[in-house]
């Protein structure tokens, strides 16, 4: 059955949800040579797994390049605790000093952003920015969840203990920092500077780097280091195309569209079996929606999509779908390959060219092999005794009673035969089964039993 026009429209919606609607200006993607002294990373929006992967990867790359400073420019309302902790762990373990800068004016480093700001070797803010309001919240689908007092105290105490563990080592005001968690207190840039929560207030990146040149900082382990940043080369590291796509998927509007398309697709497939297109689109969309809800981690989402692709390939070989399942499987495998990053299987990222080069041949090979396998189930065995089943032969030695032995000639060979009734010499018999070297036979219609 051919897919209905509505599924073409839903496919467009799915692509619109996944693919960013606008490209970054090319000027923003211009980077300096690899000898950059300052690696700039950007936190814009909610802190979630994709953003954490981007920041952690950028810090790792800066350390491998032996940069002099990692600058994280921050503007965030907060985000997930697990992603926040991944970023903070990477900052605390970085051999290269890390500066977190709430900028430009009008930005904020709230909630999880406050924790990240305080974890840095240098904490800085622009005029007209704020930070704090870091009380932990439990949410479900964006709505706060009420918990009992004991659990609420456990979560609060864990958050404040985590904050104290590194704020004290950074030489900042631990007591005031705790109030951002316990009392949800927020601070303007002046209040944060006067309260010794941040080290500098500067209007822009150039002014900040100028102030840091020659400044001696204390690292987490207590050692001191002097920064040398006179006329530094700054390299801005933006998200990769893959990370931009994943970041787009986890946005609320994209999640809503993916969930809607997934549910409608599966509903249409279950109520109208054999359409195939709704099931393919719905299955892929629902898996991406589970990823957007943070119910599936990145690597597991990739593995599930690849397994779904293999299922589609097998079904394509079995059912006449006019290529719908094959194309759906190729798309699913391509998405799955691009999602597999730093996994035990790949050990690193899968490049788009490699994903494309592998997906199409694998799809063709799997579909071809499965068709051969399924077709072989219909072939009759052409060798061995089992190929005699169903064959017609002539009785050369009569079977005088039921169960008595006789002889039958089949394909020019003589076989011992047994029947459930007497059969005379010269009668035509059909082989029902083979037991060892004895054939179980019955008379052919018209072959008289005597």
Image: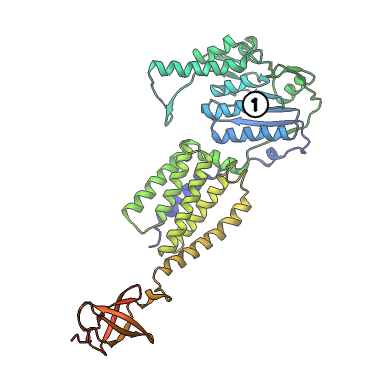
Q: Nearer the viewer, residue 128 or 416?
A: 416
Residue at 50% x, 43% y: name it: 301
Give percent across and percent down for residue 224.
75, 17
Q: Secondary structure at mark 1?
A: helix
Where does the C terminus fall, quadrant-wise?
bottom left
Figure check: 440 above or below 78: below
Give percent across and percent down for residue 324.
45, 59
Where does the N terminus fall, quadrant-wise?
bottom left
Q: Which residue is mark 1?
A: 91
Residue at 64% x, 31% y: name it: 42
The residue most toward the left is 450
Q: Quadrant of residue 5?
A: bottom left
408 sits to left or right of 323: left
Give percent across and percent down for residue 143.
41, 27
Q: Quadrant of residue 40?
A: top right
Residue at 48% x, 21% y: name it: 136
Give percent across and percent down for residue 185.
52, 13
Residue at 57% x, 9% y: name it: 175
- Local packing at callout 1 (Cα closer than 10 Å; few below 14, some 14-19, many 20+) is many
Figure check: 272 above or below 209: below
Q: Nearer the viewer, residue 310 or 134?
A: 310
296 sits to left or right of 106: left
Q: Is residue 106 visible?
A: no
Figure check: 316 above or below 79: below
Q: Nearer the viewer, residue 388 or 48?
A: 388
Q: Is residue 424 visible?
A: yes
């Amino acid at each position: 059955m051919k897919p209905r026009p509505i599924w073409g429209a839903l496919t467009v919606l799915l692509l619109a949800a996944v693919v960013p609607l606008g490209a970054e200006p090319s000027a923003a993607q211009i980077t300096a040579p690899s000898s950059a002294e300052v690696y700039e990373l950007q936190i814009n929006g909610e802190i979630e797994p994709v953003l954490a992967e981007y920041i952690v990867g950028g810090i790792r790359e800066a350390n491998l390049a032996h940069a002099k400073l990692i600058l994280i420019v921050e503007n965030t309302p907060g985000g997930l605790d697990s992603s926040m902790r991944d970023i903070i762990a990477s900052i605390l373990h970085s051999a290269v000093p890390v500066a977190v800068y709430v900028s430009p004016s009008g930005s904020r480093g709230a909630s999880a952003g406050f924790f990240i700001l305080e974890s840095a070797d240098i904490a800085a803010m622009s005029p007209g920015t704020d930070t704090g309001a870091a009380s932990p919240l439990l949410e479900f689908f964006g709505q706060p969840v009420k918990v009992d007092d004991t659990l609420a105290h456990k979560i609060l105490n864990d958050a404040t203990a985590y904050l104290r563990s590194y704020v004290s080592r950074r030489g900042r005001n631990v007591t005031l920092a705790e109030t951002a968690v316990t009392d949800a207190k927020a601070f303007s840039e002046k209040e944060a500077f006067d309260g010794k929560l941040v080290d500098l207030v500067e209007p822009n990146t150039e002014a900040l780097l100028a102030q840091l040149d020659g400044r001696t900082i204390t690292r987490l382990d207590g050692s001191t280091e002097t920064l040398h940043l006179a006329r530094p080369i700054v390299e801005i590291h933006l998200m990769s195309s893959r990370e931009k796509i994943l970041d787009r998927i986890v946005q609320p509007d994209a999640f809503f569209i993916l969930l809607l398309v997934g549910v409608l697709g599966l509903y249409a497939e279950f109520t109208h079996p054999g359409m195939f297109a709704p099931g393919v689109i719905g299955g892929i969309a629902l898996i991406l929606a589970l990823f957007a809800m943070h119910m599936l981690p990145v690597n597991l989402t990739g593995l599930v999509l690849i397994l779904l692709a293999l299922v589609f390939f097998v079904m394509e070989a079995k059912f006449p779908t006019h290529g719908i399942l094959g194309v759906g499987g190729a798309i699913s495998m391509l998405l799955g390959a691009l999602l597999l990053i730093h996994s035990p299987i790949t050990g690193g990222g899968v490049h788009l060219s490699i994903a494309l080069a592998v997906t199409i041949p694998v799809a063709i090979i799997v579909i071809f092999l499965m068709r051969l396998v399924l077709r072989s189930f219909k072939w009759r065995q052409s060798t061995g005794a089992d190929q005699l089943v169903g064959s017609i032969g002539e009785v050369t030695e009569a079977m005088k009673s039921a169960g008595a032995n006789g002889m039958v000639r089949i394909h020019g060979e003589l076989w011992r035969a047994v029947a459930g009734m007497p059969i005379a010499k010269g009668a035509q018999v059909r082989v029902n089964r083979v037991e060892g070297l004895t054939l179980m036979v019955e008379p052919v219609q018209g072959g008289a039993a005597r």
